[in-house]
Structures are given as structure tokens and as C-alpha cells.
């Protein structure tokens, strides 16, 4: 606050700039992070990056029953979907964990400004 009780706009803008830089840095870090999810006790493993893009699927040969290919295909498809969902959930948890403190800070800054929607 300035001596007259007014907020120091320059200081607030500098804080906002620092927070924006931290936010961008975290976004880059998360985009490069890979997270795995599994299904079927590890029969299928899906890897996603921090942008929730699937980058790899691994299917254990034990998931395939050569005696019943039709049923196996359906089962493996279900396991692949479950592994992807698991990996995306893990990626979202990681993003929340990393971004949570920063977004809480943004809420505090916005509240201090008294601006609607901040």
C-alpha cells in the first residue's frame, strides 16, 4: 500500500508478471512430464504426457488368449481404455498438485485487487 492507503499498482503488476512466468514454466514442465496408468493388474500400461496426450501403449502378451481371439480383443480394448483413463487421472492429479499453490496465489492476488472474476 502507498502512504495514502492506495495499492502500489507497480508492485502488483510485478507480482502478476512473476506469477505468469511461474505459470508458464510449470506448464512447460508438465507438458514434458510423462505419467503411466495401468489396468488388468499391469497387463496394459498407458503413458500420457502432461497435456493428456497418449504417447505409448504396452500390452503384455499374457493379455492375449490365442484360443479366443474375439473375446480377447474386446477385453484388451477395455483394458486399454481403463489404462488410458487411469493415466489421465494421474496426469490431472500431478497438474493439480503442481499448479494448485500457484492458482491459489492468483486468487489471493485477484481478491486483493477487488476485481470481479479474479
Image (cartoon, helix red, strand yellow):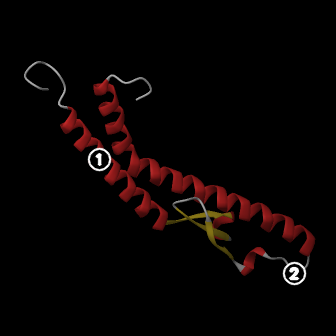
In the picture, the quarter occupied by the N terminus is top left
In the picture, the quarter occupied by the C terminus is top left
Question: Is 63 in front, or is 33?
Answer: 33
In percent of the image, x 73 and y 63: which residue is there? Answer: 79
Callout 2: SS: loop
Residue 38 at least partly seen: yes
Q: Mark 1 Cα within 10 Å, few/some/many (few <14, many 20+)?
A: few
Residue 82's place in the image compared with 103, above or below, is below
Label 2 sits on residue? 66
Residue 111 is left or right of residue 40, and the answer is left
Query: On residue 109, which mark appears?
Result: none
Label 1 sits on residue? 17
Question: Is 22 in front, or is 68?
Answer: 22
- Are dots 2 and 1 in contact, CB under 8 Å? no
Label 2 or label 1, whichever comes before in sequence order:
1
Number of numbered labels in the structure image: 2
User: x and y percent of residue 80 in the render?
Assistant: 72, 65
In percent of the image, x 27 and y 49: which residue is there? Answer: 18
Residue 33 at least partly seen: no
Callout 1: SS: helix
User: x and y percent of residue 20 in the render?
Assistant: 34, 48
Question: Is 76 in front, or is 24?
Answer: 24
The quarter holding residue 83 reads bottom right
Residue 73's place in the image compared with 112, above or below, is below
The quarter holding residue 9 reads top left
Amino acid at each position: 500500500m502507498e502512504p495514502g492507503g492506495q495499492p502500489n499498482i507497480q508492485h502488483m503488476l510485478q507480482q502478476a508478471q512473476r506469477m505468469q512466468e511461474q505459470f508458464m514454466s510449470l506448464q512447460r514442465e508438465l507438458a514434458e512430464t510423462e505419467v503411466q496408468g495401468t489396468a488388468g493388474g499391469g497387463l496394459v500400461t498407458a503413458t500420457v504426457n502432461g497435456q493428456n496426450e497418449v504417447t505409448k501403449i504396452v500390452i503384455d502378451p499374457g493379455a492375449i488368449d490365442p484360443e479366443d481371439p474375439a473375446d480377447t480383443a474386446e477385453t484388451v480394448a477395455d483394458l486399454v481404455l481403463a489404462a488410458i483413463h487411469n493415466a489421465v487421472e494421474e496426469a490431472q492429479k500431478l497438474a493439480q498438485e503442481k499448479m494448485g499453490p500457484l492458482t491459489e496465489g492468483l486468487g489471493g492476488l485477484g481478491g486483493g485487487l477487488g476485481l470481479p472474476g479474479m
